[in-house]
Image (spheres, rainbow, N blue to C red):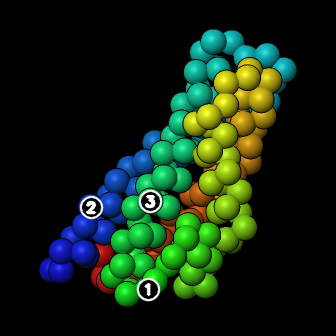
């Protein structure tokens, strides 16, 4: 098996594990729901969700898409170019939504104001299903194209 395919296969395992953990946090936060104030335990659950959302987003954009474009001999250029190409190839569902997820990821990593963090929790809840859908599409693409 080609070294690039072997690398992609290990990255897919990483992505799928991260997806499973994010899905676990998502279900936990759905049960908690939106509130004006959260207990420390509830806040921790949403912190986990946001952190896991950011991690899965990074795995997809920094590892998976790069590997796929490399294997397919595509010149993906910028991150936006990579995302647009992935949408064109039906690896992800919606380029604009993926850009929105990337912007949320950046907010998760760089925001410290408590009121803004609550908005990040809500946005993480809103966008998690789309991120998980992209995991399905990536798996389908890789299985179909590379048989992994």
Whether label 3 touches label 2, CB < 8 Å: no
Disc 2 from disc 1: Cα separation: 21 Å
The secondary element bearing badge 2 is classed as: helix
Task: Answer with mark 2 or mark 1, whichever residue precedes in sequence.
Answer: 2
Q: Is residue 32 above or below residue 140?
A: above
Do callouts 2 and 1 mark residues in contact (Cβ within 8 Å)?
Answer: no
Residue 142 relative to residue 56: left or right: left
**SS under mark 1:** loop
Packing grade of label 2 (10 A; few <14, some 14-19, many >=20) is: few
Circle on res. 31: none
Instruction: Name the residue at 61% across, 46% down.
Output: 105
Indicate left or right for 16 with 79 as reference.
left
Q: Residue at x 36, y 71 (%)?
A: 67
Residue 3, horizontal then vertical, whole percent = 18, 74
Q: Is residue 147 positioned above or below 127 on the image?
A: below
* Residue bearing the label numbered 2: 10
Q: Label 1: which residue?
A: 74
Crowd tier of the residue under label 1, counting other residues whose Cα lies within 10 Å: few below 14, some 14–19, many 20 or above: few
Q: Which residue is mark 3?
A: 62
3 vs 2, front mark: 3
Residue 27 seen in render: no
**Viewer-nearest of labels 2 and 1?**
1
Q: In the rendered view of the protein, which quadrant contains the N terminus?
A: bottom left
Which tag, 3 or 2, sits closer to the chain's start? 2
């Amino acid at each position: 098996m080609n070294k690039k395919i072997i690398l992609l296969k290990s990255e897919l395992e990483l992505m799928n594990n991260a997806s499973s953990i994010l899905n676990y946090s998502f279900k936990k936060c759905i049960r908690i729901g939106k509130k004006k104030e959260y207990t420390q335990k509830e806040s921790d659950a949403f912190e986990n969700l946001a952190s896991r959302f950011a991690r899965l987003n990074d795995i997809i954009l920094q590892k998976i898409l790069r590997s796929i474009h490399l294997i397919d001999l595509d010149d993906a250029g910028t991150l936006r170019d990579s995302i647009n190409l992935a949408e064109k190839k039906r690896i992800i569902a919606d380029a604009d939504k993926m850009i929105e997820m990337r912007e949320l990821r950046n907010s998760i990593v760089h925001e410290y104001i408590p009121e803004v963090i609550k908005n990040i929790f809500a946005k993480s809840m809103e966008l998690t299903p789309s991120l998980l859908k992209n995991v399905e599409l990536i798996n389908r693409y890789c299985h179909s194209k590379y048989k992994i």
